[in-house]
Image: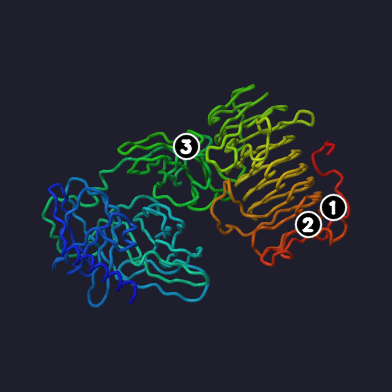
Amino acid sequence: MNRLTMRVRNGLVCFLFLCLCPVSALADDVKIEGRVFTESGPMQEARVYVYRSYGEIQGNTPLLVSGPADGQGAYKIHLPQGEYYFTARGSKDGKEFFAYHGNNPIKVETENIWVSLMTNEIKPSEYSDGATSLKGVVTYKGKPVKGAYMALYTLENKRFKGLGFRTENIEEDGTFNLSVPPNKYIVIAKKMQGDNTIRPLKNGDLFCYYPQNPVEVKSDKTVQIEVSCYPKGDRKSFVDTPAIKANDYLTTENVIDRYKFGIKGKVVDIEGKPVPNVYVLAYRGEYDTVFMMFHVSHGTEYASKTDTEGNYFIPIDSDGNFHILARNVLGGSPHSGEVYGLYGGNPRHMASFKKGQIIENINIVVGEAMVEEVKYKVKDTRKVDNVVYRTDAILDKDTVWKGNILIYGTVWVKRGVTLIIEPGAVIKFKKQDRDNNGIGDGELIIEGRIIARGTKKDRIIFTSAEEKPDAKDWSYLLFLATGSDSILDYCEFRYAFSGLQIHYSNAKVSNCFFEKNNEGLRYNRSNVVIEHNNFLDNEIGIRFVRLEGKAVINDNMISKNNVGILFMQPHGKTVNFYMEQPVSGIELPVIVNNNIYNNNDYNYKIGERRSIALDVTKNWWGSAKSEAIEEFIYDKKSDNNLGEVIYSPFLAEPVINAGVSGSSM
């Protein structure tokens, strides 16, 4: 017995049960009427299934099953007020048909509603040996659909709107071929009439739901499916048959149109000019939690696109707190040149919404990640001397720090703003752990620019404020999706989770000390120059997590750490997005002229199981003998699934001027 037959049989059992044990319509129940169609006409004998949740659809446990539709495809049911999922099933000419309403879940309140469902033929999935992938075609009335996009959602999703776990445009011939990890996915496609905007569906837009969702993607198997569409709110385009609706019932489109509440604002660049045609996304979050980039790495049902004046509006229909960001590329982490920016009204980048409201002026400043085209001009500065930031704070104008700065939570430097730190300043972070992950929450995040230029005698110090400091007392100084001309010179980083993290940004780090941190420095898809620094007594000296961007690491002293340099995807407190393929190929870091020696476990370690050869020639490894060097390198010689570390030719003696210039270390 195939899955479809089982579903139909189970549905009939539920229907018979409901007929034998009828539920009486209560006086305050709402009348629901409508019709069920195929593209050739009304579907006689079809049944409408009503569920309280999507989980009930997967469990095949409907709240209610209608009687068989009449010759006009019409049905009638009664429902109490609430939110419901509507589907329809039936057979015609020996073929099975299914419909999932694109407005699910539909709100049933006090007024009667007319709900029509347009069914498509069920075509089972087909598996074949091959790459782990999902492929197929999107069709409308049997013809391929051009200009649509495909969204995959995991079963954890409650609603299937906006971005999914994976969202991509399909090919011009209507086909798609997505390489995704093995899992079960809800497959939905959409085609917007007149544009390719990610927005709520309008009348005439195509909604396409695979009737045998979820689709299971299996290892080393290619699964092929056909996803058929119907036009939202345009039954006549789907099938031209005479209308029979003679009552004043609301349609589902009438119900949706009543909810014009949400979040609105404007997207501008750092010069205040409107930025058109960028996506603005809202992600549900908890207001009291520490903001992490993985909070906005997945899909969201709440999305919009800016108009020619940079304005946007995101419809929202329920209470919640939402992280807001703008970008011109959907999915994954920021790429070089991508327009990107987070809402800067508070360090959580969050707007609080109550049902029935319109929240205005949620404005966002964006810039190009990893592109240094705009040189910041320091304006009138706010001078801060010996200050305590007891709560999370936003720096929204150019600021100068001097003396002692104490930070209890997060300080965020907005895009377009410069933070200047004078020589001799000491920035301390008080240990707090609001998310209970064992890592202090204190952090300084740079979306704008930082100039922290110390001197040999008066270094700038970033450290713990605890009497008995320890690694992980505070989080990090973070560069996030910025292309600005920031400077870190003669600084010290101690007792952090990561002294410095650089993500999707440009940065130069020189003459800095990284000591007694969990990680000295971590970077991820960035253009970085790391030269003449000391990495001593850290758990990990330098960690990099992608082979993308231009990274130059030279003339550094990397010693007495447990691991000198580590290439590995991150775990725990991280700003990383989910795993994804490089967008422009692999670009290996240039690691030359460093003294990498006397680290406790390994001088160089690969923890990422990818068969890539990494060139780290022309460095001093603490010995002139290959056997001694290899003993402290962890690569394919230790684990055959790893890549190879190519260390030869190597330097036969230490680099004399490696490390911080003028340092005695």
- Picture coordinates of residue 158 (x, y %)? 37, 53
Q: Amino acid at mark 3?
A: Asp
Lower sequence index among marks 3 and 1: 3
Instruction: Please tell me in which quadrant of the rendered image residue 521 appears.
Output: top right
Check disc 3 and report its element: helix, strand or loop: loop
Front-most of residues 629 and 71: 629
Vertical order, 621 against 263 (above or below): below
Q: Residues within 10 Å of mark 2 (few under 14, many from 20)?
A: many
* In the image: residue 163, left or right of residue 411: left
The residue that appears at 49% across and 68% down in the rendered structure is 133
Front-most of residues 640 and 264: 640
The residue that appears at 11% across and 53% down in the rendered structure is 247
Residue under numbered circle 2: 632
Q: Is the C-beta separation of discs 1 and 2 under 8 Å?
A: yes
Distance between mark 3 and mark 2 Cα atoms:
44 Å
Q: Residues within 10 Å of mark 1 (few under 14, many from 20)?
A: many
Residue under numbered circle 1: 622
- The numbered disc on residue 288 is 3
- Picture coordinates of residue 162 (x, y %)? 40, 52
Q: Amino acid at mark 1?
A: Gly
Quadrant housing the N terminus = bottom left
**Residue 1 can be seen, yes or no:** yes
Distance between mark 1 and mark 2 Cα atoms:
10 Å
Distance between mark 3 and mark 1 Cα atoms:
48 Å
Check disc 1 and report its element: helix, strand or loop: loop
Quadrant housing the C terminus = top right
- Picture coordinates of residue 365 (x, y %)? 50, 38
Lower sequence index among marks 3 and 2: 3
Q: Is the C-beta separation of discs 3 and 1 under 8 Å?
A: no
Vertical order, 14 against 494 (above or below): below
Instruction: Please tell me in which quadrant of the rendered image residue 15 appears.
Output: bottom left
